[in-house]
Image: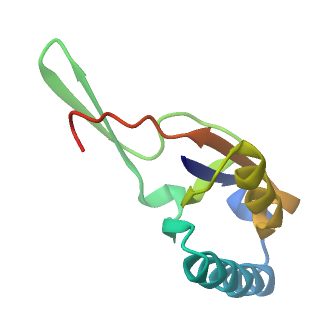
Amino acid sequence: MQYILLIYSDENCWTEEESEACYKKSRAISEALTAQGKLISSAPLHPITSATSLRVRNGKQQITDGPFAETTEQLGGYYIVDVDNLDQALEIAASLPPAKKGTVEVRPIMQLNELN
């Protein structure tokens, strides 16, 4: 079963040294998951200030710079894993460095067979 691990934290709570350590440990986790055949994809995201939000209302596009909503935690990256069950996905999520400063949301990915 595939799960997406969405990584949220306050972008301002990381020092430069903490960010570098986080990237290094996250890279090692990604390499280990790849070796186990469990990693589909993972990547950090650019800061929230680089976001562009789009809404379509009454057939017209509304484009704004910045995030969809003001929040204290921003989506900073993701992992897509293929594991046997939720417990395994939660174990991976708990090992991610951002889990210690923010939140890792774990959600199953819906497989639409007619589209895959």
Apparent side of residue 24 relative to residue 34 in the rendered image (left or right): right
Query: Which residue is located at x 42 percent, y 60 percent?
Result: 50
- At x 67% / y 44%, what residue is drawn? 106
Q: How is the image coloured?
A: rainbow
The answer to whether residue 46 of the structure is visible from this angle is no
Furthest residue in direction right, as rendered: 100
The quarter of the rendered structure image containing the C terminus is top left
Note whether 99 is above or below 55 in the view shown: below
Q: Nearer the viewer, residue 82 or 26?
A: 82
For this orientation, the residue located farthest to the left is 59
Image-based side of 64 in relation to 19, left or right: left
- Going by the image, does 51 lie left or right of 82? left
> What is the x, y in percent for residue 53?
36, 40
Tell me where residue 9 sits by quadrant. Answer: bottom right
Q: Using the rendered image of the protein, determine whether residue 116 is visible from the camera's viewpoint.
A: yes
Q: Residue at x 70, y 52 (%)?
A: 89
Nearer to the camera, 100 or 79 = 79
- Location of residue 54 in the rendering, given as x and y in whole percent from the top left corner: 29, 36
